[in-house]
Amino acid sequence: MSKSLNHLDFSTLEKKKLRANKTKLKEVHRLSLGDLQKLMNTSKIRAMELKALSEFQSVPSIGVRFAHDLISLGFYSLADLRGKNPAKLVDRLEQQIGAWIDPCVEDQFRLVVHYANHPSGSGNWWDFTGERKAFRQKHGYPSSRPKKAWYELDQYKKSNRIGAKTEVAKTDLDSRLKLACSFMKKNLQGEVTLLRLADVSNLSPFHFHRLFKEAYEMSPLQYLTRLRMKEACKLLEKTRKPVSLITSLCGFEDQSSFARLFKREFKKTPLEYRYNSGIMSHRIPK
């Protein structure tokens, strides 16, 4: 659970080359394009993609899928997004994929534009939900907005990412994985192991782990950590519970490891996050 919640879409060989050069994945965007291209012995466009994947995911709460969305629109750095209109970016992406997207994706557009305009800023995509709702309530959506929903597209159906030969088998395996997800959501405080999740899904541990990564593009434990961090953020924002209690309520081993993981993901401590959310930290027990 100590790993970053977001993951970079680098090949095994690319990761090996970075390790040989003692370069961390999250620091790839700090390399010059020429140095990265030479280090990876790759094309200029692939080097641009690797830099973009690294930089976009340096923004708190931004994952690899949205990073790819930005690249698909022709953006390869946060600087490219400076001064852009988030609503127009949403419109562009929806027209490009031929479907309307989940509202949280618009929140992510607002987040990355915010970071592009304010490099030393802070926040996560859900901090922009209120702004997005107010904007859409006032301006609505363009009449040309696609009618199809994003989850109706083949590439976004989890079952289609599962390596099974028949649709019946894909549907069955998808339902089994959802049982594991439901179990995790109900047991954030408890000890959740790979063996237990595999048992809930009625799959072997190896088969379960492989299928879960195919469908959700992250490991089961990364998914669990994301759920726990989301719950921790909610408790920090909405309650006056001390951080020590939130640590145990969300299933983290101890307060120090929780604080390290939280700061790695959100670039601030739990108390700083709470303070910025509107609850004064000096009134809250540590």
Image (spheres, grey):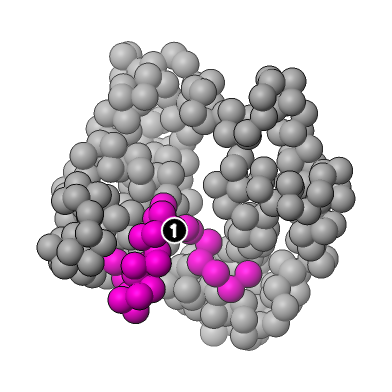
Q: Of residues 275 and 192, which is closer to you in this image? A: 192
Q: Residue 26 in magenta?
A: yes
- What residue lies at 22% left-to-right and 59% top-to-bottom? 41
In the image, residue 274 lies at what x, y percent?
A: 53, 71
Q: Residue 264 in magenta?
A: no
Crowd class of label 1 (few under 14; some 14 to 19; many from 20; radius 10 Å)? few
Q: Is residue 76 left or right of residue 205?
A: left
Residue 228, compared with residue 100, is above or below; it is below
In the image, residue 44 lies at what x, y percent?
A: 16, 51
- In the image, farthest residue toward the left: 34
Amino acid type at image mark 1? Thr
Check disc 1 and report the residue beneath it: 12
**Total numbered labels placed on residues in the image:** 1
Q: Is residue 93 visible?
A: yes
Q: Of residues 83 and 275, which is closer to you in this image? A: 83
- What residue lies at 12% left-to-right and 63% top-to-bottom? 34
Q: Is residue 218 left or right of residue 64?
A: right
Residue 137, compared with residue 51, is above or below; it is above
Q: Is residue 274 visible?
A: no
In the image, residue 137 lies at what x, y percent?
A: 41, 30
- What residue lies at 25% left-to-right and 32% top-to-bottom? 88
In the image, residue 40 lies at what x, y percent?
A: 26, 62
Q: Which residues are magenta?
A: 1-28
Find numbered disc 1 in the image and state the secondary structure of the residue it sits on: helix
Q: Quadrant of residue 26?
A: bottom left
Q: Is residue 231 left or right of residue 10?
A: right
- What residue lies at 82% left-to-right and 66% top-to-bottom? 190
Residue 230, compared with residue 181, is above or below; it is below
For the C terminus, which image quadrant? bottom right
Q: Quadrant of residue 11?
A: bottom left
For the N terminus, which image quadrant? bottom right
Q: Of residues 172 and 6, which is closer to you in this image? A: 172
